[in-house]
Image (cartoon, rainbow, N blue to C red):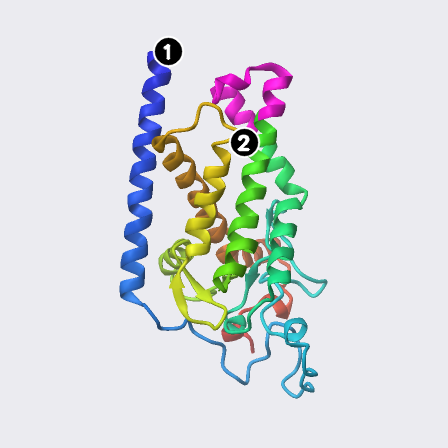
Amino acid sequence: MMVHQAVQANSRRYSYYAVILILFTAVSAFAQNPSTPEPQEPPHQPTSTGQPNNAPAAPAGTTEAKQPGVLAPGKTDQGEDKYIFGVLPNYRTAEMDAIGHPLTAKRKILIATKDSFAYPLVFIGAAYAALYQYDDSHPEFGQGVAGYVRRFATSYSDQVIGNFMTEGIYPSLLHQDPRYFRMAHGSVKGRAWYAISRIVLTKSDAGHTQINFSELIGNGTATAIGLSYYPDDRDAGDFLQNWATQLGTDALSQIGKEFWPDIKRWLRHKRGTEAPMSEVPPSNRP
């Protein structure tokens, strides 16, 4: 019992550190680059929609369907790469040239729906439930099949509620863009820092850099809702721990989205197969 209490105390302490680190990242990143937009592709480069430069302009009213950057990075000649490592949904990743091309509220909700009900999320929820079962987290749920089902239902609910809050509801209300705009160039350290900083920085629908209230408040709301179905997690320490876990999970997710196309090219090179031209960065194309 004492060991279990010590583990819980350490977990809370680390959650406090995580929250402080997140807030420090927000302040420092915003102070370093409050309004400078990320690098844009040169105008003569083809956009990520795959249309040539001399393609006819899209008819009025079809901006959303024809806008650049909607397809996910890592796409192949056979279509979009919707899952990173076959597990992580990749529906809301976009190219830099999509900045300033806002999504409608309907499309934001659609992205949240796809991210929430993609089949790999079931396996992720099952993995979390198994981990919680092994650690006997939330002992009120019990053990055995009944305890596992409760843990699976709550862990999967955490993901679904968090996705809808951060990708659909709050971005629509606050007019922020829920997509992750992939940097795609620069040093590994710089790109990793950029991916993590998108937890606290985002683009408005108009393309301006803002504090990512959709992510921060959205995950906070999801965590608060979770307190209603976690009977033993109802104090400030538990809230901060769960909130930090949600933010950390999203940060790791964005690192995966940033580097997945590079990993794919490395794997192709290792197998001795040439990557399709659509996967080669514009700067490296002949």
Instruction: Identify residue type, mark 2.
Output: Tyr
At horizontal 55% and vertical 85% (from top left) the residue drawn is: 44
Residue 203 appears at what percent x and percent y? 45, 66
Q: Position of residue 106 (x, y in %)?
A: 64, 61
Q: Identify the residue under disc 2.
A: 128
- Region rendered in magenta: 128-150
Horizontal side, residue 273 vs residue 139: left or right: right
Question: Picture quarter containing residue 270?
Answer: bottom right
Label located before the other in sequence (2 or 1): 1
- CA distance separating discs 2 and 1: 23 Å
| 90 left or right of 185 in image | right
Q: Is residue 124 above or below residue 255?
A: above
Image coords of residue 253 (percent x, y): 50, 49
Name the residue at 47% across, 22% down. Answer: 137
Instruction: Residue at 66%, 63% (x, y): give it.
Output: 76
Crowding around mark 1 (Cα neighbors within 10 Å: few <14, some 14 to 19, many 20+) is few
> With respect to residue 200, does 221 lie above or below?
above
**Furthest residue in direction right, as rendered:** 78
Q: Which of the labelled discs sits on residue 1, or is there none?
A: 1
Q: Of all residues shown, which one is farthest toward the top?
A: 1
On whether residue 228 falls in the magenta region, the answer is no
Choose top left, top right, bottom left or bottom right for residue 2: top left
Total numbered circles: 2
Asked if residue 149 is among those painted magenta in the image, a careful observer would answer yes
